[in-house]
Amino acid sequence: MSAPTLVVEGLTKQFGPLRAVDDLSFEVRPGAVTGFLGPNGAGKTTTLRMLLGLTRATAGRALVGDRPYVEHERPARVVGAALEASSFHPGRTGLAHLQVFAPQVGVSKARCAEVLEAVGMGHAAKQRVGKYSMGMRQRLGLATALLTDPPVIVLDEPTNGLDPEGIVWIRGLLRTFAAEGRTVLVSSHLLREVEASVDDVVVIAHGRLRHASPLAGLRAQATPATYVESPRLDAVTALAADRGWTVAPDGAGLLVEGGTAAEIGGGAHAAGIELHQLVSRDADLESIFLELTRTEGGQR
Ligand SMILES: Nc1ncnc2c1ncn2[C@@H]1O[C@H](COP(=O)(O)OP(=O)(O)OP(=O)(O)O)[C@@H](O)[C@H]1O
């Protein structure tokens, strides 16, 4: 499948005094799952709405391939999106919801039942949406997005309300979409909910880009931390002070921040300091994410 790239260029949205999205630029490539991450209120939904032509940008533009979403001849055939799980008519059954939507996007009624089955909702097709749990609504939203079998899939917080089994299921589904060559953009305020299924990450806070890279690149943002044990901790502390690293007592040793194991080992060797342990501590991605979204500045 050849799927278009999503291109966001200088996208900005002003709501009165609030700049909800501020000069945001990033790309979402086909054949990969991109996590669109940021804390609550960061501007994720507003960005997705601008991408889908539901909200007009104050400045900048968002393209699906070579043109804005609304300028595609049949936009719903290009992008399948699930933005808000709660906006279904409560009196309609899940199947009826899809069947009302189907003619608008040019798909058959038979396709509706097939997609409901595919998202694990075959059993609830004839139940009213008002009786659906949050997780069931999420699955119905996903079914709506998938009706046209689109090359681009955009999902806003798809893990909200899903049980652990549902989260594992959606991970597998996202991986399958990417393997099929589709362009997949998934927002979340929790990195750990999407960590296992994303290839790339775009991190925003206060409407601004904080970081965009493959997931592995996020680790490189972490300050290196190394646990050191030595019979001469005072000498290690002096070495760290000399190099501008910070130290904190940690059990029988010290946690050195700012220096890699190689830098500390090399420095200690040169200074004749005996070391008994030298262990790199991998920062967990969630704390890097929190650090990125808390602090001002960062990559723009
Ligand atoms: N129609 C609107 N009018 C005024 N302010 C709005 C409007 N829509 C969103 N906002 C504000 O813009 C900011 C960004 O909201 P947005 O919903 O895009 O964030 P989000 O990252 O999707 O957050 P969440 O994870 O909570 O959904 C928030 O401060 C929100 O209150």
Image: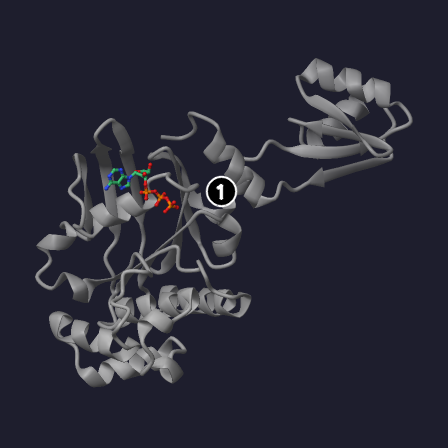
Question: Mark 1 CB in 8 Å range of ligand 1?
Answer: no
What residue would you read off at disc 1?
A: 217
Q: Quadrant of residue 287?
A: top right
Tally of numbered discs: 1
Q: Is residue 175 left or right of residue 43?
A: right
Q: Is residue 28 left or right of residue 219?
A: left
Q: Quadrant of the N terminus?
A: bottom left
Image location (x, y in percent) of residue 74? 11, 64
Q: Residue drawn at (36%, 35%), measured in percent from left and top? A: 209
Image location (x, y in percent) of residue 146? 28, 70
Ligand 1 in which quarter: top left
In the rendered view, tell whether residue 279 sits above or below residue 271. below
In the rendered view, tell whether residue 164 sits above or below residue 71. below
What SS does tag 1 mark?
helix
Q: Residue drawn at (29%, 76%), measured in percent from left and top? A: 94
In the rendered view, tell whether residue 17 sits above or below residue 106. above
Q: Residue drawn at (76%, 18%), measured in percent from left and top? A: 239
Classed neighbour count for the residue bearing mark 1: other residues with Cα under 10 Å, few (<14), some (14–19), many (≥20): few
Image location (x, y in percent) of residue 227? 76, 34
Q: Quadrant of residue 245?
A: top right
Q: Is residue 282 left or right of residue 128?
A: right
